[in-house]
Image (cartoon, helix red, strand yellow):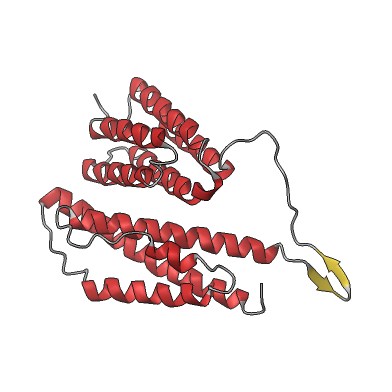
Amino acid sequence: MTAETPSLIADLAACRQIVEDYVKRLDAACEEYYATGKYLFPSLSRAEDEDVDERCIRALNKLAAIEPDALARWRDIPYPSNQYDQQIERLRDIWVRRRNLLRVLESSLSSRFELQPRKDKGAETVTNYHITIHDVVGPVNVLSSLDGVIQAVRNAPSLSNDGKDRLAALIEELKSSLANAPDAHAEDATVVSEQAQSIADELSKPAPRPSALKIKASGLIEAAKAMEVVVPAALTVAKKIAAFVANPMS
């Protein structure tokens, strides 16, 4: 870490916020796509898409000294070129994954910077503690997050008691599969849990929107596909959840 680290983190946070806003607009476009069948959206443009991409690439380039693989991870998220079927949904999924990458990088860098020893009048102080947790398998934050998803599902007013039990069991199954995720795929597991959370959030509304549920279920499947090689069970469960979400009142 260097004296420039705070400004780099601030720049990364600014990029993340730009992407957050862009994803919200893509979410709205996806809902309109499923509701109306439209595929042209005047509020979105390829030029803006490229501008946001370039802005983030510049910020990630600056991180090279302290996070050398950041830009490669950004570029490893495939862009849906020449894929015109459900193009807006595919585009939204790409930017969701990019947004999640920026969130992970921002959180990681902020934590590492805060954990650096600080010197005050010659005395070295540490601003945080490193805690080792024994006998815990899997990405702890992800598993804890999915516990919250299960609780949200059990409280969802839009679901019958049987529906709550069925979906909660599927989320529990997803949690068990992600417990086997290797550390190298912690970021992918985080994306999966976030997509599951978005489904629970929609079902927590008195009248969930079918088009929104379809989009979020598709996002969950796409997120699980990124882990198919290392945790194939996650994709299997994601498809079961998507099938349930397609008709949650049955």
Residue lying furthest top = 162
Q: Is residue 151 visible?
A: no
Which quadrant of the structure image shows residue 137? top right
Image quarter hosting the N terminus: bottom right
Residue located 16% across and 69% down the image: 42
Q: Nearer the viewer, residue 119 or 32?
A: 119
| Residue 208 image-quadrant placement | top left
Residue 200 visible to the viewer: yes
Residue 184 relative to residue 97: left or right: right
Residue at image point 56% right, 71% down: 9
Q: Residue furthest right?
A: 122
Q: Is residue 207 left or right of residue 14?
A: left
User: At 28% across and 57% down in the image, what residue appears?
Assistant: 92
Can you say whether 111 is above or below 7 in the image?
above
The residue lying at 13 percent from left, 63 percent from top is 40
Query: Seen in the image, is 88 located left or right of residue 129?
Result: left
Where is residue 31? Give x, y as percent: 21, 52
Does 77 sit above or below residue 203? below
Work out whether 186 lies above or below 106.
Answer: above
The picture places residue 149, in percent across and down from the top left corner, at 45, 37
Residue 134 in percent (x, y) is at 70, 37
View extreme (front): residue: 229
The x and y percentages for residue 192 are 41, 44
